[in-house]
């Protein structure tokens, strides 16, 4: 090969090496750029991570405070709920105690020689039962007598007479029982006791439309019918027991009297020591309980129910039925008499009204057929 050819060959090899070197340089630049980009990205990630770490660090105190607050709220709510549960349990226990006290009160009063008055407030009844349990019957008899004489003062007894004045059944004997109460308030117990005792029998005779002589057996039958366990009264069994064992107790002249309120012993002149304030109050309270048991009466085939003593149902020969319970189903198809009740159920029948409506979904008292 001549000189000129060798020169071209050398230049050609040189050109190839130059081209390869340029490619390597370009590739290196690309690689470095990629590495730089990754490094920059990692740096940004690191910066973001640092920012998040700083944010979380700043956020931790309020989060901890929130957590503590929520824990406190939870504890408080739990405590409140526990208090609510405790209050419910205590109230339930009170209701049980109140029911037991209510039941025992009648028994205790009967043992102490009193007809149990249903109009005493529950705390008063509880106080009497607790005193009896703590001190025994002998001390309780003295203490209870003093409490009752103090409670049934002039205002209480005059309010009682006002109740009697609104009862048609008592209209013809109201002047007698009112005078008896007035005599009691004046301390004239020698007059008040014999005045009111026979009115109890007269009241029962009127209520049951009795004609002719009423012996003790019939008297007791009427009392048992009126004072059955489902009676309106709070203590019907105890009142009936009092009538049987205290009011109607047997006696013999010259023998000890077995009761300080023996109707027979007092009115037949055997008991001359009856004139005490306590005996007089017992007679008044017994009359009040018996008259309170007479409330509603219906007649066979009638469309109304009436107050006992209503002129529409006190005619001779009428077949009457006394409703002794507020849940007497005989009333559901009848309406209130417009003469004695003004066409409206008395307050103590509102329970019947609501109960019958809820339990049976039938007509209520005011929805019954009209005349």
Image: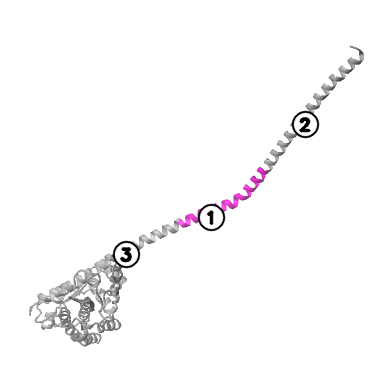
Q: Which mark is residue 95?
A: 3
**Alpha carbon distance from label 1 to label 2:** 59 Å
Magenta stretch?
Answer: 48-77
| Residue at which label 1 appears | 69
> In this view of the protein, which residue sits in the foreground, 39 or 175?
39
In primary-sequence order, the first of circles 1 and 2 is: 2
Q: Between residues 159 and 135, which one lies in front from this camera angle?
A: 159
Q: Is the Cβ of the residue at disc 1 closer than 8 Å to that at disc 2?
A: no
Residue 26 visible, this orientation: yes
Q: Position of residue 16 (x, y in %)?
A: 82, 21
Quadrant housing residue 150: bottom left
- The Cα–Cα distance between marks 2 and 3, rounded to whole angstroms, is 94 Å
Labelled pair 3, 1 in contact (Cβ < 8 Å): no
Q: Is residue 289 visible?
A: no
Q: Left or right of 270: which side holds 185?
A: right
Q: Which mark is residue 29?
A: 2
Q: Quadrant of the C terminus?
A: bottom left
- For label 1, the SS is helix
**Residue visible at 46% across and 57% down?**
77
Q: Residue furthest top?
A: 1
Residue 72 painted magenta: yes
- Mark 2 and mark 3 lie on one chain; the one further toward the N terminus is 2
Dot 2 falls on a residue whose secondary structure is helix
């Amino acid at each position: 090969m001549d000189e000129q050819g060798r020169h071209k060959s050398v230049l050609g090899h040189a050109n190839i090496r130059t081209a390869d070197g340029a490619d390597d340089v370009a590739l290196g630049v690309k690689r470095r750029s990629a590495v730089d980009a990754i490094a920059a990205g990692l740096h940004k990630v690191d910066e973001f991570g640092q920012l998040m770490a700083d944010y979380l660090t700043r956020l931790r105190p309020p989060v901890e405070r929130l957590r503590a607050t929520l824990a406190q709220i939870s504890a408080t709510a739990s405590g409140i709920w526990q208090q609510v549960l405790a209050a419910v349990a205590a109230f339930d226990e009170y209701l049980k105690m109140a029911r037991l006290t209510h039941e025992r009160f009648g028994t205790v009063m009967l043992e102490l020689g009193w007809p149990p008055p249903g109009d005493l407030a529950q705390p008063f009844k509880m106080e009497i039962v607790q005193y009896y349990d703590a001190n025994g019957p002998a001390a309780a008899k003295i203490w209870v007598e003093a409490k009752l004489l103090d409670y049934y003062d002039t205002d209480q007894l005059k309010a009682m007479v006002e109740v009697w004045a609104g009862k048609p059944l008592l209209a013809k004997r109201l002047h007698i029982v009112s005078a008896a109460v007035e005599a009691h308030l004046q301390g004239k117990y020698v007059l008040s006791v014999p005045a009111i005792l026979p009115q109890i029998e007269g009241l029962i005779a009127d209520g049951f439309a009795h004609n002719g002589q009423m012996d003790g057996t019939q008297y007791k039958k009427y009392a048992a019918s009126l004072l059955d366990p489902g009676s309106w009264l709070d203590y019907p069994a105890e009142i009936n027991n009092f009538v049987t064992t205290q009011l109607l107790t047997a006696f013999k002249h010259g023998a000890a009297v077995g009761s300080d309120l023996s109707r027979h012993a007092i009115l037949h002149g055997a008991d001359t020591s009856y004139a005490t304030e306590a005996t007089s109050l017992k007679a008044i309270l017994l009359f009040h309980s018996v008259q309170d048991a007479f409330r509603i009466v219906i007649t066979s085939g009638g469309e109304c129910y009436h107050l006992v003593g209503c002129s529409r149902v006190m005619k001779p020969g009428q077949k009457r039925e006394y409703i002794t319970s507020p849940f007497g189903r005989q009333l559901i198809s009848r309406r209130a008499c417009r003469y004695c009740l003004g066409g409206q159920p008395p307050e103590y029948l509102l329970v019947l009204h609501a109960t019958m409506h809820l339990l049976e979904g039938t007509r209520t008292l005011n929805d019954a057929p009209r005349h």
